[in-house]
Image (cartoon, grey):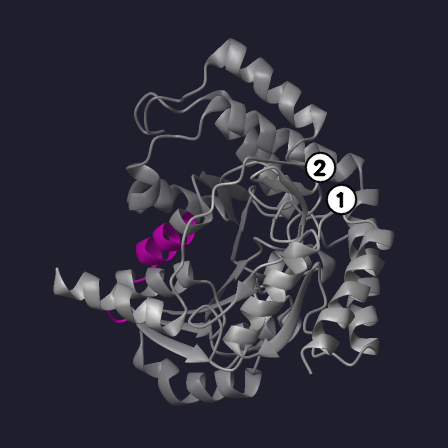
Amino acid sequence: MDRIDDFLAQRKADGLLRVLRPADSRKDGKIYYDGAELFDFSSNDYLALSDHPRLKEASKKAADSLGVSASASRLLSGDLKIHHQLEDRVAEFKGKESALVFNTGYQANVGIISALYDKGDAVFCDRLSHASIIDAVRQSGAKLFRFNHNDLDHLESLLKKEGDKFKNRLIVTETVFSMDGDKPPLKELVDIKDKFDCLLMVDEAHATGIFGPNGAGVVEEQGLSDRIELIMGTFSKALGSFGAYLACSEKIKQYLVNSCRSFIYSTALPPPVIVADIEAINIIRDEPFRRKTLLANADFFRSRLREAGFDVKGDSQIVPLIVADSGRAVCISSDLQKSGFWVLPIRPPTVPQGQARLRFSLTYHHSKQLLEKLADRIVEVMQSEK
């Protein structure tokens, strides 16, 4: 097809063609390529739980007793008691009445929004929200309005101008944005939601396990569980396993069980994954030192880069270093990789033009001493380019 040839040729010409690079292995915060060992700063394994012995042991036991596959959707014969045990734990963890488990975060967002909203409805979405949220709104048929990132004045102006034209209104945001590492003004968003008679959906994929007194996320941290109708997140990042969830009312859960296509027509998550998800929530409760150490180290690393005069964003475990030019981001990434640091460039269209960056995804494996060494190397690389 000409369209495919043209697309690939243009991507190559722009230096934006993505390729898959299979690693030999990854372990203990390191990644191995062709025998080379690099410290991995692109993983979402924030609390280093993916190799935790408790998760591995729980998964092995489940595989032995229940098998490695659910073998059917949950509305057929794939529904096991452990799926309901996980949903009960999620509901308790998130401070909501009920919860529903999905296979991935993408499937959760697309399925939830497209099931709850339709033509004649409107969704007001932060401009930096995940691609799955944008795809969900488009699939739903609802009218999409995108407000400037964390700009509540812009959101309120859109609601005043457009809100009354639609039967149902949803506001969507993330509690930690994956490319900027920052948080929204959540309490103010809740107030706007109430003022304009909307529902609010938050994506806590990058916040769950990290923030809050019990590690439940930013919603818990700010005491807003009762005021936010739809709290979505994943098990595949800080919780070190796989899958996604929605914490919500029992009524919304039952509606989705009967209407959400990405839930109805997917094979249920396998038993080893489900029990690993349950055990991950237990570890979040039992080992709070992981999230406290991670956030303290992230603050140290961000401060160190800012002291060196760099443009650094965020207030979480995600630390973006803005370098503006895509070519420069690629060159700096290459230099850091040669020094043993696996850091990837993030370029348009993932981020806006002129906002190319190096995204440092910190984990519990990254000690303060390692981050000091990395910061020193970044200074050397950046200064050598001037």
Please tell me which residue lies in front, 51 or 147. 51
**Per the image, is 223 magenta?**
no
Residue 365 is labelled as: 1
- Residue 164: x and y in percent read 35, 82
Q: Is residue 223 left or right of residue 332?
A: right
Residue segment shown in magenta: 108-120
Q: Amino acid at mark 2?
A: Asp
Q: Amino acid at mark 1?
A: His
Q: Residue at x 61, y 49 (%)?
A: 44
Real-space Cα separation, disc 2 to disc 1, in angstroms: 7 Å
Q: Which secondary structure is most common in the magenta stretch?
A: helix
Residue 28 is labelled as: 2
Label 2 SS? loop
Precedes in sequence: disc 2 or disc 1: 2
Q: Is residue 364 left or right of residue 352?
A: right
- Residue 361: x and y in percent read 65, 56
Q: Is residue 104 left or right of residue 208?
A: left
- Residue 267: x and y in percent read 34, 31
Q: Quadrant of the N terminus?
A: bottom left
